[in-house]
Amino acid sequence: MTLAMLQIGAGISAMLVRGQIAYAVPPVIDTLGGGSLGPVPWLVIVAAVMLAIGHVVLTYTRFGRYVYMVGGNREAAEYSGVNVRAIIAAVMVISALCSGIAGMLGVAHFGSAQQNEFDNYLLDSISAVVVGGTSLFGGQGGIPNTIVGLFVLGVLNNGLDHINIDSFLKVLIRGLILLAALIINVYAQRLRAAAPLA
């Protein structure tokens, strides 16, 4: 379903823009994307607010606990009386809303919008979450872990940009690091699953 909607969204975008680049950005979005509040860019403020809201919701609300329950064991959550379909639908809607906000701010920051402008960020976003230690199998993770993953990837990308190596090699290195994080993630999950049996 996710991959299908990705293709549908890309198709709608292609039909709307017809390969053209749009430069007209609403003033409010332009301010948030390129302006600042004193020395602090609005992009940083918006990101901090969104991360703080996500952390509070996931850590201190019933909805957040249900999200972890559904991610950890969908059947157990359903037997416990959690409306699993509603939780999954809510998470998808929230994800789409956050993606839309990020897309608008990204367009404002770069000053233009084109069809495939942010395709590369899809893998980066997944990498940040995985490198931060969030389990691919659900039930483990959180906003602080994701922030750590973002910083790790940011330092890595900046470091690779400052090293005189082939640009294609940078992509390979980032892929290898993501693969290592995935392997560690899988083995950590197996260790957690085996721990109660010991």
Image: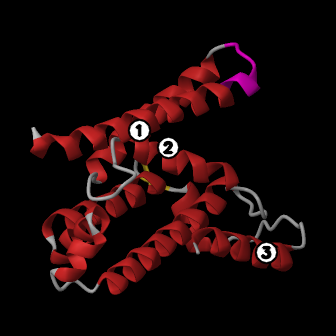
The residue lying at 21 percent from left, 73 percent from top is: 76
Q: Are marks 1 and 3 in contact (CB under 8 Å)?
A: no
The residue lying at 53 percent from left, 67 percent from top is: 99
The residue lying at 52 percent from left, 69 percent from top is: 101
Counting other residues with Cα less than 10 Å from the Cα at mark 2, is it few (<14), some (14-19), or many (20 or more)? many
Secondary structure beneath label 3: helix
Q: Is residue 25 left or right of residue 15?
A: left
**Gap between marks 2 and 3 measured at Cα:** 25 Å
Q: Which residues are magenta?
A: 164-170
Identity, as a three-letter code, of the amino acid under mark 3: Gly
For the C terminus, which image quadrant?
top left
Which mark identifies residue 127? Answer: 2
Q: Is residue 44 left or right of residue 190?
A: right
Q: Are marks 2 and 1 in contact (CB under 8 Å)?
A: yes
Q: Which residue is mark 1?
A: 131
Secondary structure beneath label 1: helix
Secondary structure beneath label 2: helix
Counting other residues with Cα less than 10 Å from the Cα at mark 1, is it few (<14), some (14-19), or many (20 or more)? many
Counting other residues with Cα less than 10 Å from the Cα at mark 3, is it few (<14), some (14-19), or many (20 or more)? few
| Residue 39 position in % (x across, y down) | 41, 45
Which mark identifies residue 11? Answer: 3
